[in-house]
Amino acid sequence: MVEETRHHLLSSCHFSSAIWSALSQCINMDLSNSLIWYSGGYQLLSLNSSLNSNSKAIVANAMWFIWYFRNNILHDEGRPSTNNVVMRIVAFSSSYVKAHLPEGSVDSNISVDCWIPPPSNFLKINCDRVFNNPDGAAGLI
């Protein structure tokens, strides 16, 4: 068993490496460089960083999601797919940034186009649902 250090969690384990590799495509920056993670990734989140607010949110949320899902894996609660984790990180980060924009402002950097196609031998079917509790209305696409 490998010692669970911060560096291992954020950089050298296979799970986090796959997440960073996929997220690198989303923010157009190589996040798989292990030197970034010796400091815990903090230089990426600093005010001096060249990353926009959405990319910083993705990096910060990715660190939390990696920690969360690694705990689930270590405690035998299942291993989510890389695509599932990446989609959660991007969606949560985008929602966070949108929610913290000053009222009436528009940020053109909020939209993150990050679609990771499934492996060639898989069929991906997207669906969505909504439920409005006060009205009891529901919909499924």
Image (cartoon, rainbow, N blue to C red):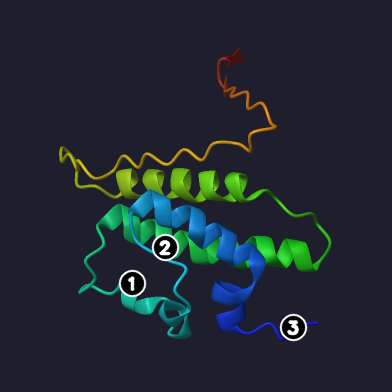
In the image, residue 84 above or below residue 15: above
Q: CA distance from mark 3 to mark 2?
A: 24 Å
* Type of amino acid at the residue the image marks with label 1: Leu
* Type of amino acid at the residue the image marks with label 2: Val
The residue singled out by tag 3 in the image is 2
For the residue pair 91 and 32, the one nearer the viewer reads as 32
The residue singled out by tag 1 in the image is 44
Residue at 54% x, 36% y is 117
The residue singled out by tag 2 in the image is 59
Q: CA distance from mark 1 to mark 3?
A: 26 Å
For the residue pair 48 and 30, the one nearer the viewer reads as 30
User: Quarter of the image containing the N terminus?
Assistant: bottom right
| Label 2 with label 1: CB-CB less than 8 Å | yes
User: Quarter of the image containing the C terminus?
Assistant: top right
| Furthest residue in direction front, as rendered | 120
Horizontally, residue 38 falls left or right of residue 102, namely right
| Furthest residue in direction left, as rendered | 105
Q: Secondary structure at mark 2?
A: helix
Residue at 26% x, 62% y is 51
- Please identify, in this view, whether the residue under mark 3 or under mark 2 is nearer the observer: 3
In the image, residue 12 above or below residue 90: below
| Label 3 with label 2: CB-CB less than 8 Å | no
Q: Which mark sits nearer the N-terminus, 1 or 3?
A: 3
For the residue pair 126 and 133, the one nearer the viewer reads as 126
* Type of amino acid at the residue the image marks with label 3: Val
Horizontally, residue 60 falls left or right of residue 8, namely left
The image shows residue 140 at horizontal and vertical percentages of 60, 15
Q: CA distance from mark 2 to mark 1?
A: 8 Å
